[in-house]
Image (cartoon, rainbow, N blue to C red):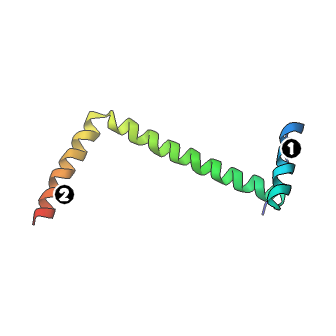
Amino acid sequence: MATYTSTLSDSLLKKLSEKAKALAVPKNKLIETALRLYLEHLEKAEYIQSYKRASEDNDTLLMAEEGMVEYLKQIEK
């Protein structure tokens, strides 16, 4: 495991300390969990944006519609 050093504002560090104490977890674990959740949130947001872009692309929509026609034909068989 790597070591990472950073600086936080006094107010943010105070909030971190208070929350870590209230949850009875080490500050580094709270930061690790928060960062993991935030990075997952960013990945989901990127995924959603890719679908929004695809929904605005006529070529992608045509391919999807053609794929659905083929899918429905397979289901009917």
Q: In this rendering, does residue 9 appear at all? A: no
In the shown orientation, is residue 39 left or right of residue 27?
Answer: left
Q: Quadrant of the C terminus?
A: bottom left
Of residue 15 and residue 34, the one placed in the foreground of this image is: 15
x, y percentage for residue 43?
A: 54, 47
Residue 15 placed where, x, y %? 83, 44
Q: Which mark is residue 13?
A: 1
The spot of residue 7 in percent (x, y) is 86, 41
| Left or right for 5, reference 49 | right
Residue 73: image x %, image y %? 12, 58
Task: Please name the residue shown 20% across and 51% down the image.
Answer: 68
Of the two numbered discs 1 and 2 in the rendering, the one whose residue sits closer to the viewer: 1
> Where 64 sits versus 24, above or below?
above
Place residue 70 in its image quadrant: bottom left
Q: How many other residues sit within 10 Å of disc 2, few (<14), some (14-19) or many (≥20)? A: few
Please report the residue visible at 28 percent of the width from the left and 40 percent of the height from the top: 60
Q: Which quarter of the image is occupied by the N terminus?
A: bottom right
Q: Amino acid at mark 1?
A: Leu
Task: Name the residue located 10 percent from the left edge and 63 percent from the top edge.
Answer: 76
Instruction: Give whichever of discs 1 and 2 has the lower sequence position.
Output: 1
The structure residue drawn at horizontal position 52% and vertical position 42%, both measured from the top left corner, is 45
Kindly identify which residue carries mark 2: 71
- Return the mark for residue 53: none
Q: Residue furthest bottom?
A: 77
Asked whether the residues under the numbered discs 1 and 2 touch, taking CB atoms below 8 Å apart as contact, a structural biologist would say no
Q: Secondary structure at mark 1?
A: helix
